[in-house]
Amino acid sequence: MRNKVERFLRLNYRRRKKFQLVELEDFLIREYGGQTGYYDHGGYRQLARVLKELEFENIIREIKSSPLNGKIPPLKTRWIKVSEKIESAWKEGEIFRLSDLLDLSYYLNHPQEQTEKEWQRILSIYRFLQEREKREWASLEERSLELFGDEKFLSGKGRNKDNRILSRLGLTPEDLKARKYGQMFVYWNKGVKEIKEILILENHSTFFSFKRAIAEGIAIFDLNPDALIFGQGKRIIKSLSFLEEIADPGEVKLYYFGDIDPEGFLIYHSLKEKYPGFELGLHLLSYSALIKAAGRDFPCEQKGRREDLEFVLSEFREGGYLKETEEITRIWNSGLRIPQELITYEYLLKLKDK
């Protein structure tokens, strides 16, 4: 029976140190194929002897605050596996040698993490820090590949998910001159050298419809932007940081046009908060046209934040679009939405011909 109890302790210890006596008994009953098999191998009395042996050997101990189980001999209902003291695997001299650039206190307090693989990673980091001032900035993936042989190690997506080494050392990717670059937005330039006006669109099909219209000289409700950006929904919140790749952020006027729904409003509100230095506003005429184009109700399953709605409505009020303000409020309160895909190339073409 002792072998089975020790097996239970090994399996249980992977999850937690403490265990209930009833859990152990249930495990033994299953192992012996039922109550009869358990009794044939000594049952409860044999289990009590095994537990006392393991307690004497300081492998387990009873939790004194737990009650007795009422059986003979009486045993505590809860037990705990005694933690084994783990000796440091790394040499003190080597740890001290690296301490001029690295804080290894975590590993001193957690000797179970002192593996050879972890030590080699630490050495790679230490060698980099020695020449950090001479090194150029790189992407997180490039630095991860250089130091650990796995380009996804530091992003948490690699083959080895145990990538907490930086936090254990009290470091950040910036300490390794590594940056996590986002994905640049998709954009179209109508052919100008200096972009002064940009219209950001939430959805893919609208981007292509507007691109076709502008290329043919059709204005987007009195707006003739130099470039269009496909925001890819919420991705634009991060990717707009690449604006300087195509224009001078201080010299360009940005307009946003998305769906009339909670997510569209959240995206715009987030952009305004994240990029306060950009001249960014809603393209109110496009929204006004979108409301007029909606010939029926479109149900909305999104859950929105009232603060996003109020932020957008304030801009409509400031622009004098009071009827639109009332309609957007009604749409929101009714659990409806209006997708911007209603403004198609054909729709713009018909407006031109009027």
Image: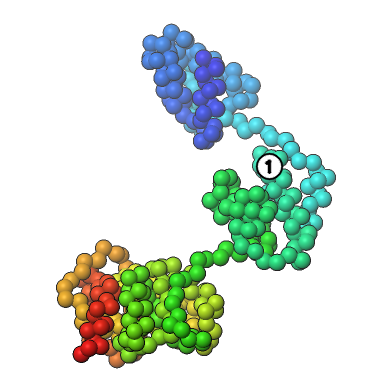
* SS under mark 1: helix
Amino acid type at mark 1: Lys
The percent position of residue 338, horizontal first and vertical second, equals 25, 73
Q: Is residue 209 visible?
A: yes
- Left or right: 108, with 167 as reference point: right
The answer to whether residue 290 is above or below residue 175 is below
Q: Quadrant of residue 28?
A: top left
- Corner quadrant of residue 136: bottom right
Q: Quadrant of residue 303?
A: bottom left
Residue 309: x percent and y percent? 32, 76
- Depth order, front residue of 188/122: 188
Disc 1 packing (10 Å; few <14; some 14–19; many ≥20)? few
Left or right: 16 with respect to 353?
right
Residue placed at 22% from the left, 84% from the top?
Answer: 350
Q: Residue at x 36, y 74 (%)?
A: 207
- Residue at (78, 59) in percent of width and height: 130
Q: Which quarter shows the C terminus?
A: bottom left
144 relative to 234, above or below = above
Q: Is residue 264 visible?
A: no
Tell which residue pokes out farthest to the top in this image. 40
- Residue under the point 76% across and 55% down: 127
Residue found at the far left of this picture:
296
- The residue labelled by disc 1 is 117
Q: Position of residue 26 (x, y in %)?
A: 41, 22
Q: Is residue 129 above or below residue 220?
A: above
